[in-house]
Image: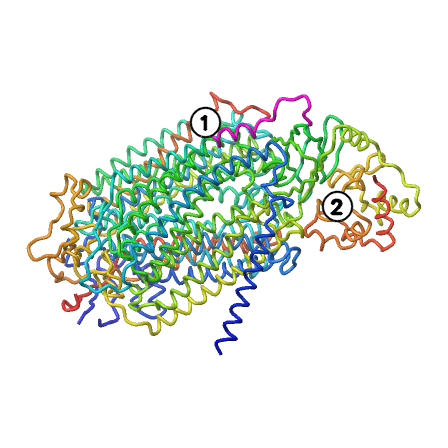
């Protein structure tokens, strides 16, 4: 009977070793929101300070932890010593040792404190630069508005920034507190109603960076995601110029029907245009995301789904399942399948 | 001991015309049975009530945690809805902080403090009962929200303006506000009681610098409670006014500042962290010396660093707000104060290590929990130092790294120590031993399960997983480790099942524990297990910091190290000294009091006044759910409040009352 | 065999008097001091809220438009005088002078009532004449909740004093009850001191640092 059970145990052991190494192997330092994979000066400074605190802490932990394990093994005695067993030396303390250890702890704290304070100031103020791009960020339940005040461009959930130039973000909240966080570019700063916060970041490596709201903000807090996309300078300027343009009126008949639904709604007073803006059309709503160049964005629903025909249709039909608690009134509209198809076609023309 | 029904305090003739009120309720005389428990003012029974109730809420909070972990085991799951998930983590946090760790500590305060200082009871026994009933009713009120599908979903920190009616129109926040107000009264009243008890009711010779460290941590915690809870009370009152009346404290359009809520909350919230951990540090400081067979290393330093942690705890609150844009100066200042608090904390760890050093460690279950505490608390402490640095914290804040950090502090720290304390003092409280075998199994399972659950969360946090998300997408690199965490949570469940099984079987047929099953050091081990209701038949006169230990091991006092400066202050001459024929630790002088021992009578008023406040709070919540023009809720609230106040009046008028016990001289 | 008997408080053995602890301080007094420490944090938080919101109120009426300093100075003076009466109340009962005790105790409570009357008058004028409401603006919310909480403290104090007064007609009220009076007195003095702070911060400071009209 022993053999099968021990072979079972061996197999279990083998499985767990394999799966554990598999997991460790899965520990990639370049995952989408990894703080280890820094791509800009702000996250770099933050990473460096974190490393100092990590290594000092780890060092003390290894020393004190080893002493603890050593003491726990070295000084073990009988579990139930006889009543007349001699006592170990009854030491009460050692003032010199205690004072020394306190001073050592103080020294280690100072070692961490100096780079910390330097890091605070370095990450706080944006460098004085004429290159700097200013973006006004507004957090809504549960999506992001990005406004480029210099060029009057408004977009949502996808922040485009020029590579290698500092970006200054003015953070505002429209309803409750949110927090702007793109781990690879910069740690988070909160968006707080009645308070003007600012942060800055800079991307030194090209890429698409994942970000997410980091302050609990209600039902769909988990679904308040966004992307930061870097562009080379010229590309960026071209993009701004394109985003500034009004939306083109569709030529495709299906899309034209969709535009009709968007502007007038299935019934009076239930138009998409009440809440959304599409520049160059009567749609001037300010409650929801600006959709002027909706189809030019990589994602949909605040970083939730890839922006393609199928997902737009899903968004319009299964909205509440896709994004619980959303503030859209779609559910009340009960669009017909034809209307959904037309609307999706229209939205996909908004390049 | 003969239990006879006891007459209520006789009312003197000349007072009868005024005391007609008192006759509405006869003084309860039940010493046993359900009524005995409801009207009890005995600190040991109240302690047991606290402990059992806290275990019940621990079960609820644990189930909430398991649901959370099940939902997060895989990406894009729908085990529970987004709203339910948000309710679960709000209730899990609130429950574990206010209904589990705090009352479990209070259970030990209640049972142990009077025993350890050689007192008959706490200073205000009826107030003590009132604290318990307010705690129970506050906890029930909070959890009643589940029954109405109105559990709060704003997070345990309840940041404005998410708590405003605009964003949270249901009654969840109302349930949360009112139960926290009730729990706050409970904690404040209990803390006042322990402060007076510890300062005023010490036995002769039990100087402050001879108090067991656990008692020291109790008084430090009590001061933290009375100074921190008023702040959250004010925040809650402001929020309640906003929601019930329509004031503008956190009304954005009228200029309200959400950051004010955060300041008020964390001026309370950070001391609260120490309210949770200091009692645990006290328990460990009792367990380690006993099972190392050595005195605590550097007692004065351990006491002083505990007090320093408590004091400094009020200077670090803004480190919870590093990402709110306070500015570089404020962030630097709060970062430095936070790092500074690591020093007294580190000093405590050094001294615990010094206690083990050169000892004869006995691997009993309480000691395993004690050693586990030091290791796990250290990990929690070090990750704490990591987010004391604002640049690093900007990445770590509100991620699973923080979740890992505070679970290492609150489970690896507080709960390991509290369960160690349970194994250590269970024999004293019940007179029966828990199983070493089951206890060892439970400890190992818990240790493995805990680390499996929470260690990977460090990685998840640094890999960008935010807290309080009910779901996450695929491809973020979070999938596998979340499953590991969930598996760990179920291993922890197994550990708690073992502990619960052990508790129940030990209670029914555990072997009898004598007075002193562990070769203990402090005064509670000098009296029978379970202690008689009067605790000490003769109040002990104390000669030593570890009186029971010194009594058993006279050579302990003869050791050179004992006579150092702090042991012989100038006032030494005033302290009682052992006489011829007395032990080195303590003496029972003067014989039994011929009048007997005066025991306070039970009382209805603590439970009834607490009930009144419960009705008032429920009425207020109900009034919010009622349509315009209906006032049943408000009427209920006023009646409840009146009932509560009238009961407090009657409580003041009924007097101490009581009866005498003549202990059998042979028992002692 | 252990035996139990009913407690008769008649044999008067001082050993049963557990009210005074090993520090020589009575339990009740010690607890009241600790409670007052706690209450300091309570009022501290409320006053901090008021100060932080000072000048942030963005719709009228503004503080300088409503305050009636002469009236509030009068009521503050009465409240301070009542503290003096409280001292005399305690002195009387410590000397077993029941008559004077009743006189001064009633005067203290009366002082408190005058203060409360002025507050009621002040609140109703603010409300009816100046249209300062609890919900209208931030100033109204912070002002009424802060001063109202203080007023509630005064009202509880008056109730306490009246209870002591009524109790003094019950047989056996004497210097043995001085502790109860002293504890009530501690509370009363504390509430007065808090008012001094509130009066300074809320009313007087308005003349040094007026809230900017229009926030």
Q: Are marks 1 and 2 in contact (CB under 8 Å)?
A: no
What's the mark number on residue A300? 2
Q: Residue at x 66, y 45 (%)?
A: A224
| Residue extent of the magenta highlight | A115-133
Q: Quadrant of residue A172?
A: top right
Question: Callout 2: helix, strand or loop?
Answer: strand
Residue A95 appears at what percent x and percent y?
A: 25, 39
Horizontally, residue A148 falls left or right of residue B603, namely right
Tag 1 residue: C203
Residue C60 appears at what percent x and percent y?
A: 59, 29
Q: Quadrant of residue A256?
A: top right
Spatial separation of the CA atoms under disc 1 and disc 2: 55 Å
**Magenta span contains residue A111:** no
Discs 1 and 2 carry the same chain letter: no
Residue in the foreground of this view, choosing between B280 and B175: B280
Up-down relation of residue B458 to residue B390 (above or below): below
Where does the N terminus of chain C fall, quadrant-wise?
Answer: bottom left
Other residues around mark 2 within 10 Å, as few (<14) / some (14–19) / many (≥20):
many
Q: Residue at x 28, y 40 (%)?
A: A97
């Amino acid at each position: 009977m022993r053999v099968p059970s021990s072979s079972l145990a061996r197999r279990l052991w083998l499985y767990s070793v394999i799966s554990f190494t598999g997991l460790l192997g899965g520990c990639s330092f370049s995952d989408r929101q990894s703080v280890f994979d820094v791509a800009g000066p702000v996250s770099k400074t933050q990473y460096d300070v974190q490393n100092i605190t990590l290594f000092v802490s780890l060092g003390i932990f290894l020393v004190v932890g080893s002493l603890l394990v050593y003491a726990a093994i070295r000084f073990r005695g009988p579990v139930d010593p006889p009543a007349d067993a001699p006592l170990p030396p009854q030491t009460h303390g050692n003032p010199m040792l205690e004072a020394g250890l306190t001073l050592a702890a103080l020294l280690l704290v100072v070692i961490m404190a100096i780079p910390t304070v330097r890091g605070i100031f370095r990450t706080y103020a944006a460098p004085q630069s004429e290159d700097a791009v200013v973006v006004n960020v507004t957090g809504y339940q549960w999506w992001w508005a990005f406004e480029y005040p210099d060029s009057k461009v408004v977009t949502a959930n996808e922040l485009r920034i020029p590579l290698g130039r500092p970006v200054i973000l003015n953070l505002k909240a429209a309803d409750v507190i949110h927090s702007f966080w793109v781990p690879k570019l910069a740690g988070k700063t909160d968006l707080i109603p009645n308070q003007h916060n600012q942060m800055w970041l800079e991307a030194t490596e090209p890429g698409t960076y994942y970000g997410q709201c980091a302050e609990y903000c209600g039902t769909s807090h988990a679904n308040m995601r966004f992307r930061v996309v870097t562009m080379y300078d010229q590309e960026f300027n071209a993009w701004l110029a394109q985003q500034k343009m009004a939306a083109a009126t569709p030529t495709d008949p299906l899309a034209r029907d969709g535009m009709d639904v968007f502007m007038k709604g299935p019934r009076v007073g239930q138009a998409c245009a009440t809440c959304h803006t599409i520049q160059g059309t009567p749609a001037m709503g300010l409650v929801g995301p600006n959709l002027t160049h909706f189809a030019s964005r990589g994602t949909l629903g605040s970083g939730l789904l890839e922006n393609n025909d199928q997902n737009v249709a899903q968004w319009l039909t299964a909205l509440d399942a896709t994004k619980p608690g959303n503030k859209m009134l779609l559910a009340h509209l009960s669009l017909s399948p034809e209307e959904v198809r037309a609307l999706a076609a229209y939205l996909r023309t908004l390049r | 001991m003969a239990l006879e029904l006891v007459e209520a305090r006789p009312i003197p003739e000349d007072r009868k015309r005024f005391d007609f009120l008192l006759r509405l309720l006869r003084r309860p005389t039940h010493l046993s049975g359900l009524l005995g428990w409801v009207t009890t003012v005995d600190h040991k029974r109240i302690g047991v009530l606290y402990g059992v109730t806290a275990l019940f809420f621990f079960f609820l909070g644990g189930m909430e945690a398991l649901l959370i972990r099940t939902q997060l085991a895989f990406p894009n799951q729908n085990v529970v809805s987004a709203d339910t998930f948000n309710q679960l983590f709000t209730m899990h946090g609130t429950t574990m902080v206010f209904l589990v760790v705090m009352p479990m500590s209070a259970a030990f305060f209640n049972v142990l403090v009077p025993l350890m200082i050689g007192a008959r009871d706490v200073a205000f026994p009826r107030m003590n009962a009132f604290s318990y009933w307010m705690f129970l009713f506050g906890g029930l009120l909070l959890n009643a929200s589940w029954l109405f599908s109105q559990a709060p979903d704003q997070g345990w920190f309840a940041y404005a303006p998410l708590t405003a009616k605009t964003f949270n129109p249901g009654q969840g926040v109302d349930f949360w506000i009112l139960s926290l107000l009730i729990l706050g009264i409970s904690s404040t009243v209990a803390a006042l009681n322990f402060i007076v008890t510890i300062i005023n009711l010490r036995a002769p010779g039990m100087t402050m610098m001879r108090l067991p460290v656990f008692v020291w941590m109790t008084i430090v915690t009590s001061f933290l409670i009375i100074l921190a809870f008023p702040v959250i009370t004010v925040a809650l009152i402001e929020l309640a006014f906003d929601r019930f009346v329509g004031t503008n404290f956190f009304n954005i359009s009228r200029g309200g500042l959400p950051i004010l809520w955060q300041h008020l909350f964390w001026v309370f919230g950070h001391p609260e962290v120490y309210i949770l951990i200091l009692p645990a540090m006290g328990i460990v400081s009792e367990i380690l010396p006993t099972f190392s067979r050595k005195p605590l290393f550097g007692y004065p330093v351990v006491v002083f660093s505990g007090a320093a942690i408590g004091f400094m705890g009020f200077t670090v609150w803004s480190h919870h707000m590093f990402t709110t844009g306070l500015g570089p100066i404020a962030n630097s200042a709060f970062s430095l104060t936070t790092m500074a608090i690591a020093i007294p904390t580190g000093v405590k760890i050094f001294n615990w290590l010094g206690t083990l050093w050169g000892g004869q460690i006995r691997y009993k279950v309480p000691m395993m929990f004690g050693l586990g505490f030091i290791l796990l608390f250290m990990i929690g402490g070090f990750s704490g130092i990591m987010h004391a640095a604002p640049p690093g914290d900007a990445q770590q804040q509100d991620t699973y790294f923080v979740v890992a950090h505070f679970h290492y502090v609150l489970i690896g720290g507080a709960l390991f120590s509290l369960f160690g304390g349970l194994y250590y003092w269970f024999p004293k409280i019940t007179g029966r031993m828990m199983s070493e075998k089951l206890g060892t199994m439970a400890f190992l399972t818990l240790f493995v399960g805990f680390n499996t659950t929470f260690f990977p969360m460090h990685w998840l946090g640094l890999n960008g997983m935010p807290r309080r998300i009910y779901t996450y997408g695929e491809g973020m690199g979070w999938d596998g480790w979340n499953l590991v965490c969930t598996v760990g949570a179920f291993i922890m469940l197994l550990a708690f099942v073992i502990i619960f099984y052990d508790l129940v079987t030990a209670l029914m047929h555990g072997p009898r524990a004598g007075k002193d099953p562990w070769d203990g050091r402090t005064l509670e081990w000098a009296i029978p297990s379970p202690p008689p209701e009067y605790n000490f038949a003769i109040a002990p006169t104390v000669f030593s910091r570890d009186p029971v230990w010194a009594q058993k091991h006279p050579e302990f006092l003869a050791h050179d190290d004992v006579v150092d400066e702090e042991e012989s202050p100038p006032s030494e001459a005033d302290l009682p000294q052992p006489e011829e024929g007395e032990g080195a630790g303590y003496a029972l002088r003067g014989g039994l009091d011929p009048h007997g021992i005066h025991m306070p009578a039970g009382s209805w008023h603590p439970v009834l006044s607490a009930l009144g406040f419960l009705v008032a709070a429920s009425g207020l919540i109900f009034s919010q759910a009622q349509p315009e023009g209906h006032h049943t809720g408000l009427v209920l609230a006023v009646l409840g409040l009146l009932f509560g106040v009238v009961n407090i009046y009657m409580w003041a008028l009924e007097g101490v009352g009581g009866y005498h016990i003549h202990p059998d001289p042979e028992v002692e | 065999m252990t035996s139990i008997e009913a407690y008769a408080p008649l044999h008067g053995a001082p050993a049963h008097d557990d009210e005074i602890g090993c520090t020589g301080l009575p339990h009740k007094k010690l607890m009241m001091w600790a409670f007052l420490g706690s209450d300091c944090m309570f009022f501290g938080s409320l006053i901090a809220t008021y100060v932080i919101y000072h000048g942030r109120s963005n719709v009228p009426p503004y503080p300088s438009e409503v305050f009636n300093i002469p009236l509030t100075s009068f009521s503050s003076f009465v409240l301070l005088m009542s503290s003096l009466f409280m001292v005399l109340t305690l002195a009387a009962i410590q000397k077993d002078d029941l008559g004077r005790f009743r006189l001064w105790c009633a005067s203290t409570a009366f002082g408190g009532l005058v203060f409360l009357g002025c507050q009621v008058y002040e609140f109703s004028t603010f409300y009816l004449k100046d249209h300062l409401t609890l919900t209208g603006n931030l100033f109204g919310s912070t002002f009424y909740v802060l001063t109202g909480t203080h007023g509630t403290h005064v009202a509880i104090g008056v109730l306490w004093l009246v209870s002591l007064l009524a109790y003094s007609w019950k047989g056996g009220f004497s210097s043995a009850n001085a502790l109860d009076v002293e504890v009530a007195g501690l509370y009363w003095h504390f509430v007065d001191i808090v008012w001094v702070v509130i009066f300074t911060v809320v009313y007087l400071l308005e003349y040094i640092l007026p809230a900017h009209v229009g926030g």
